[in-house]
Amino acid sequence: MTAPLLELRHVGKTYAGGGLLSRRKVSAVKDVSFTLAAETPEVFAIIGESGSGKSSLARMVLGMGTATEGQVLFRGQDLARLRGRAARLDFMRQVQPIFQNPFEAFNPLTRVDRYLYATARNLAGADGQPAAEAAADRALQQVGLSLDELRGRFPHELSGGQLQRAAIARALIPGPALLVADEPVSMIDASLRMTIVNLFRELRDRLQVSILYITHDLATAYTISDRIVIMRQGEVVEAGDARAVLAHPTHPYSIQLKDSVLSVEGAWQEEGTRP
Ligand code: ADP
Ligand code: MG
């Protein structure tokens, strides 16, 4: 039996809040469990308002913060027990982040193409400049860009949308099995958001990569996701197939969330609007 791609078992995260002398603790994530199968890539959305624990969860999945309760397992391996450089490198290749602000993801003083070459060398074994350029170009083509468009350009010379695509391309270079995208379009112009989130579905199909899509935006999550969980104050209040959950939300918070979207998106009522 193959281990799941990702498994969260009763995961919790408590921060010691309020400084050294304070005993106040912030319980950011409480008892979260879900599983992504290894065989079928999917877009899995984690939806919640600001402060609901989404980024804390994302960081734990990325191995950037350890769970204070429960376990996060990637291909059966508990991330809290990941030891050694080879194991960490392998994990980094397989699980790649995409963050909210692409201008923070890139060094403002480094040309965007050079940053991609470095990733190709460090994480994809590209040996020499031609191999690094080929890897960068392949990844850029996957997101609708090309190396020719980016060559020699600095982050500030690109639009937010272009730079976020480049960040997604960078994440694709090592050939990951899982992308963790934490609010990847919330800083992008509204007119471009849909094309970028639709890209996640295309990548799922073309590259067989799973995507953890973290957002406060129910509308995009509904449109692109296979399954969703809705979080509130660190807890999962609703989980399941995206269409089923949003057709019949049961928790008052998800009903409220759905209503707030319905008020701006008439198309919601239509069954089958989802591609
Ligand atoms: P979201 O991404 O949904 O906005 P976060 O995971 O960032 O939620 O935050 C969840 C809660 O945890 C918030 O109350 C936040 O203030 C708190 N929190 C997040 N990171 C830290 C930290 N490093 N130290 C203390 N509290 C934190
Ligand atoms: Mg966040």
Image (cartoon, rainbow, N blue to C red):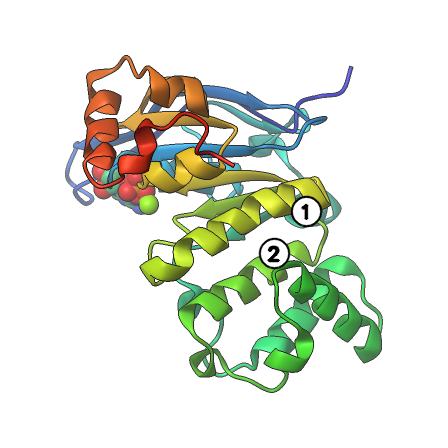
Q: Residue at 55% across / 51% down in the picture?
A: 199
> Quick one: 43 or 264, which is closer to the camera?
264
Residue 115 in which image quadrant: bottom right
Residue 236 in which image quadrant: top left
The location of residue 254, given as percent across then percent down, is: 26, 23
> How many numbered callouts?
2
Q: Is mark 1 within 8 Å of ligand 2?
A: no
The quarter in which the N terminus is drawn is top right
Mark 1, residue position: 176
> Quick one: 158 or 243, which is closer to the camera?
243
Q: Amino acid at mark 1?
A: Pro
Contact, mark 2 vs mark 1 (Cβ under 8 Å): yes
| Residue 267 seen from this side | yes
Q: Does dot 2 land on a helix, a strand or a loop?
A: helix
Mark 2, residue position: 171
Mark 2: few/some/many CA within 10 Å (<14, 14-19, 20+): many
Residue 118 in which image quadrant: bottom right
Drawn side of residue 4 relative to residue 54, left or right? right
Looking at the image, tell me whether mark 2 or mark 1 is earlier in sequence order: 2
